[in-house]
Image (cartoon, helix red, strand yellow):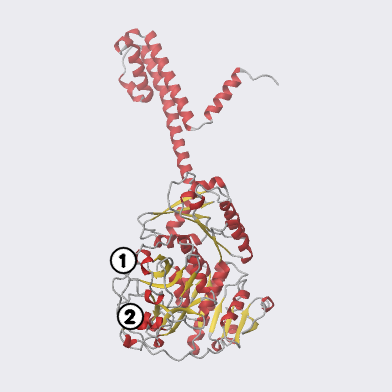
């Protein structure tokens, strides 16, 4: 092989400098301009000495040549000999080419820089921000909820890292979410599975990290890989790393996801949560509205509030300790949560009180205990008889069905019946041993009106509509809506009442479904998004919801208002709290019969003003938290009611709890 020539070496060097981009091109154009100006000035000095004298000799000629190179119009006023004018023309023509090339280079460089900025590849510089890794339909619900949660903060930021175009993400957010108030959203284009791309979102200074599963097949694999990448990351401050939250769709992937994430992360089973919500909502009409309010930051949420000022008081006495909040439980120093503990549980001041409130900034101790209208408290009724066996109709079938029926068996009375009607083959072989339920099966298309009427829907007290597993989510929702329309029409025509709980994927379809007058909908994806958002603000809230949704813990019940207050008697919410306390139950609100079918709250009122006038009728309901099968143990002292009424409210400042603690 021959040795490279000087020309080849020079060309290779020139190519390398040109490959450096816009700065190198501008440098070469500047050098060409300098050479042209110097050559023209020198020749003018030599060929036109008289003109050189009139124009300031060589320095003046350099200046005039430079002006003509940058501005061709300057030559219009030139006078002098032919050599001088010819050289100035040469400078002008050369300048036209150089300036044109410079403009092209600058334009191209500016366009490239704008395109680079549009890609979102610069590192963000933020503190205490929320990071979302991945992109799905859930991101819109999450952003809307984070904006609501951050309204009390002066400045907040959410950073999204996804393998999508930055501008497309921003346009979608503006179209789907709209105004985010004080919350600023920053999008970055990158793959969350790559360590280099993760550095773009400043994980070490983040407050929380949320991993969203992408659409498509095996989304859990993506979640596990991202969690593994985060778990193996070398954090700058290992002791103060942000808390990580994620959800998996398949329960079999939960152990792997938790191993990948490590002990500091919170990974939830989306299927399990959705099933528990469906089963809970199936039991009591209006319960899903209560859960939606608790999960949605637009309503009331649970907060963990340090309460050293309440040391020495009992939980029953603390029920009216806050002006705009209701204590519902305690989180002990060892991390365990007890909802609706015994009313005589004495607080040590080391616990965190689980408070239901509209916002954490509104949680403060009351200066005076609200009045209690004892004459309005109803005499505790005798124990209600065990409810009769239930008849439940399940329309449709999917992968959640078997676990749902098994969980339903734990709630119903012996002798209850659950009939399955779906287009699939008989799924009863997937069920395990059941103690209380007898399960039947009929092959049926729930959207077929004749087949639906043949099921004798009016003979059932409760109906569950499951989204079909063999169709895409939009088509499954369309089938669910058709089934709901038929069910409500049958209800009106036959003058019967049965509760309906439906499973719908897209929240937009939930709004359409409201025309059917159904007050219970479980939108699986939306509620999981709401729960993930709650956990991103405070990961310990998961224990609260897990206790509420577990049949072995405390649950939410809607009970007749007449069991607590005398119908039609003037009272207030503090009186209702006292009536529940005497029964060992924590009252969190009520449901007015007049609003049962009025969206969006369906008569549900949570955490009202304790002193505002309140009159409940026989058809109204009281929303309580109590142990399964009855209330918790009331205070053991015989004068517990009098002692609670006479004890002054604790005074003194209480450090404000935060959802991000």
How many numbered marks, from 0 up?
A: 2
Q: Give the left or right position of residue 19, taking residue 154 as reference.
A: right
Q: Which mark is residue 645?
A: 2
Q: Is residue 407 above or below residue 660?
A: below
- Pointer 1: residues within 10 angstroms few (<14), some, or many (20+)? few
Q: Do the residues labelled 2 and 1 touch (CB within 8 Å)?
A: no
Q: Where is residue 42 in the image (x, y as percent from the top left)?
A: 40, 12
> 78 and 328: which one is in front?
328
> 116 and 366: which one is in front?
366
> 290 and 552: which one is in front?
552
Q: Can residue 121 be seen in this view?
A: yes
Q: Is residue 381 above or below residue 397?
A: below
Q: Position of residue 187 (x, y in %)?
A: 47, 51
Q: Give the left or right position of residue 179, taking residue 476 as reference.
A: left
Q: Position of residue 403 (x, y in %)?
A: 61, 74
Q: Can residue 222 be seen in this view?
A: no
**Mark 1: which secondary structure?**
loop
- Quadrant in which the C terminus appears: bottom left
Q: Is residue 648 above or below residue 660?
A: below
Location of mark 1 (residue): 652
Which residue is painted at 35% across and 85% down in the image? Answer: 616
- Pointer 2: residues within 10 angstroms few (<14), some, or many (20+)? some
Q: Earlier along the polypeptide chain: callout 2 or callout 1?
A: 2
**Mark 2: which secondary structure?**
helix
> 107 and 599: which one is in front?
599
Q: Where is residue 157 in the image (x, y as percent from the top left)?
A: 42, 53
- Quadrant in which the N terminus appears: top right
């Amino acid at each position: 092989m021959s040795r490279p020539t000087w020309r080849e070496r020079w060309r290779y060097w020139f190519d390398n400098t040109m490959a450096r981009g816009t700065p190198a091109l501008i440098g070469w154009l500047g050098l060409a301009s300098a050479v042209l100006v110097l050559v023209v000035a020198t020749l003018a000095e030599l060929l036109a000495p008289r003109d050189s004298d009139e124009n300031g000799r060589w320095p003046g000629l350099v200046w005039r040549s430079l002006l003509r190179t940058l501005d061709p119009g300057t030559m219009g006023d030139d006078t002098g000999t032919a050599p001088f004018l010819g050289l100035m023309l040469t400078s002008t023509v050369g300048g036209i080419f150089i300036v044109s090339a410079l403009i092209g280079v600058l334009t191209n460089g500016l366009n490239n820089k704008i395109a680079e900025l549009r890609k979102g590849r610069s590192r963000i510089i933020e503190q205490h921000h929320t990071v979302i890794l991945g992109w799905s339909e859930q991101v819109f619900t999450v952003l809307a909820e984070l904006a609501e949660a951050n309204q009390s903060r002066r400045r907040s930021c959410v950073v999204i890292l996804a393998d999508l175009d930055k501008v497309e993400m921003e346009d979608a957010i503006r179209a789907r979410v709209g105004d985010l108030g004080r919350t600023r959203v920053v999008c970055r284009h990158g793959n969350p599975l790559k360590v280099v791309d993760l550095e773009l979102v400043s994980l070490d200074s983040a407050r929380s990290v949320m991993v969203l599963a992408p659409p498509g097949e095996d989304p859990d694999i993506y979640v596990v890989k991202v969690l593994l990448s985060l778990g193996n990351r070398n954090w700058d401050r290992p002791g103060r790393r942000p808390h990580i939250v994620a959800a998996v769709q398949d329960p079999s992937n939960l152990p792997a996801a938790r191993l990948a994430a490590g002990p500091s992360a919170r990974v939830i089973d989306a299927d399990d949560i959705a099933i528990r919500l469906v089963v809970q909502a199936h039991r009591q009409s209006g319960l899903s509205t209560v859960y939606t309010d608790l999960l949605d930051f637009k309503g009331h949420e649970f907060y963990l509030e340090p309460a050293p000022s309440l040391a020495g008081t009992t939980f029953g006495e603390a029920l009216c300790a806050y002006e705009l909040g209701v204590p519902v439980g305690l989180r002990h120093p060892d991390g365990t949560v007890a909802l609706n503990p015994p009313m005589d549980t004495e607080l040590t001041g080391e616990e965190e009180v689980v408070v239901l409130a509209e916002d954490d900034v509104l949680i403060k101790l009351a200066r005076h205990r609200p009045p209690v209208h004892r004459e309005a408290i109803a005499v505790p009724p005798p124990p209600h008889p065990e409810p009769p066996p239930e008849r439940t109709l399940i329309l449709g079938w999917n992968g959640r069905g078997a676990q749902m029926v098994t969980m339903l068996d734990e709630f119903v009375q012996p002798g209850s019946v659950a009939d399955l009607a779906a287009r699939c083959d008989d799924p009863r072989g997937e069920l395990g041993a059941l103690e209380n339920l007898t399960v039947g099966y009929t092959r049926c298309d729930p959207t077929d009106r004749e087949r639906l009427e043949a099921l004798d829907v009016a003979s059932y007290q409760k109906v569950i509509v499951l989204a079909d597993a063999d169709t895409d989510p939009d088509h499954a929702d369309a089938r669910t809506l058709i089934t709901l329309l038929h069910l409500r029409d049958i209800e009106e025509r036959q003058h019967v009442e049965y509760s309906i709980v439906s499973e719908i994927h897209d929240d937009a379809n939930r709004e359409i479904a409201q025309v059917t007058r159904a007050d219970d909908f479980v939108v699986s994806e939306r509620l999981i998004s709401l729960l993930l958002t709650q956990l991103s603000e405070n990961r310990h809230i998961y224990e609260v919801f897990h206790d509420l949704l577990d049949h072995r813990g405390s649950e939410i019940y809607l009970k007749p208002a007449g069991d607590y207050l005398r119908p039609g008697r003037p009272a207030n919410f503090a009186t209702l709290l006292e009536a529940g306390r005497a029964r060992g139950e924590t009252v969190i609100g009520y449901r007015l019969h007049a609003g049962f079918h009025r969206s969006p709250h369906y008569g549900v009122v949570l955490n009202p003003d304790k002193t505002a006038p309140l009159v409940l009728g026989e058809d109204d309901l009281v929303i309580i938290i109590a142990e399964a099968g009855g209330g918790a143990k009331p205070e053991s002292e015989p004068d517990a009611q009098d002692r609670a009424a006479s004890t002054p409210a604790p005074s003194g400042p209480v450090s404000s709890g935060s959802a991000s603690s």
